Image: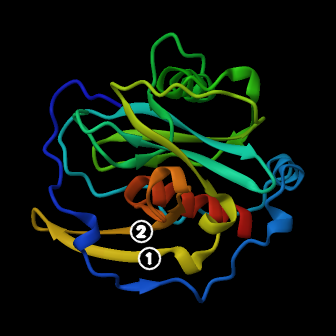
Amino acid sequence: MNPAKPLSLPLFDPRSIPVLGIDSHLAGIGLDRLTPQALRDRFRHPPMWTPEHSVEKKFSDRPPALAAVLLPLVMRDELMLLLTERSTNLSTHSGQIAFPGGRTDEADRDAVDTALREAEEEVALPRHHVEVLGTLPTYVTGSAFIITPVVALVKPGFQLQPNPGEVADVFEVPLGFLMNPAHHRRHETEFGGVLRQWLSMPYTEPMGEAAGSESRERYIWGATAGMLRNFYRFLSA
């Protein structure tokens, strides 16, 4: 999501901000409710619910811009969420963990079209592998992007090719891990005289022997974690 002009982004290491609390008192979503058919049924018959995170406090005076992201749930033995690590040369949110997605183009038919197009452009995820389930409420970032999250099932068998200008890495996280609030941590810090609050969901990714290490931390936080928390609220309602 490249803005029309450079942004003055908050400069801090989110890992250095203390944890205020962990939401282990909230019930997780059972794996029986995290199956492809269970999710199809939930989107066909959505409950009454309210998103927990909707609008971040602004840190930019740029005009709002529409965008969409894809929450691609790969249908393996258990559902796995496909995430990206943004390239460090990007002007916004560089190096952060994100969903595939970006700014809406004039030629896009709707938010779903934006999300699918961006996923193709960023990681070469083919549309014919994607079954769109529905959308979640919009999420407005501090950089003034009005994001529509598009939730979809993805049939395995694809071969990804990350665009090096936008994506440094692609990986998968078990959906069951992300839908367990025992892994949701709360933080806050002051920036520019404004108290900002957010969630983090650090995931320790097992690495194979060929990688030369036992594990790697994927630090999921900010808007990505906020939209995942809304997904949790949608499934737990």
Distance in Å between CA atoms under marks 1 and 2 = 5 Å
Q: Position of residue 207 (x, y in %)?
A: 53, 58
Q: Position of residue 97 (x, y in %)?
A: 41, 49
Q: Which of 3 and 213 is in front in this view?
A: 213
Indicate left or right for 166 with 33 as reference: left
Q: Residue at x 30, y 28 (%)?
A: 2
Q: Which mark is residue 127?
A: none
Q: Do the residues labelled 1 and 2 touch (CB within 8 Å)?
A: yes
Which quadrant, please, contains the C terminus?
Answer: bottom right
Left or right, 6 with reference to 206: left
Residue 134 quadrant: top right
| Residue situated furthest left in the rendering | 192
Mark 2 or mark 1, which is nearer the start of the sequence?
Answer: 1
Secondary structure under the numbered disc 2 in the rendered image: strand
Residue closest to the eye, 169 or 35: 169
At label 2, the amino acid type is: Leu
| Residue at far top of view | 107
- Say which amino acid is labelled 1: Arg
Q: Where is residue 227 in the image (x, y as percent from the top left)?
A: 52, 55
Structural crowding at the residue carrying mark 2, measured as other residues with C-alpha within 10 Å and reported as few (<14), some (14–19) or many (≥20): many
Q: Which residue carries the number 1 mark?
A: 185
Which residue is located at x 69 percent, y 76 percent?
28
Q: Few, some or many C-alpha atoms within 10 Å of disc 1 (few <14, some 14-19, many ≥20)?
A: many
- Residue 178 in picture, x, y percent from top left: 60, 65
Q: In the displayed structure, would residue 21 be above or below residue 205?
A: below
Which residue does the image show at 21% across and 63% down from the upper left?
Answer: 13
- Taking the spot 44% from the left edge, 76% from the top edge, the residue there is 185
Q: Name the residue under label 2.
A: 199
The image quarter in which residue 33 lies: bottom right
Q: In this view, does 181 lie above or below 106?
A: below
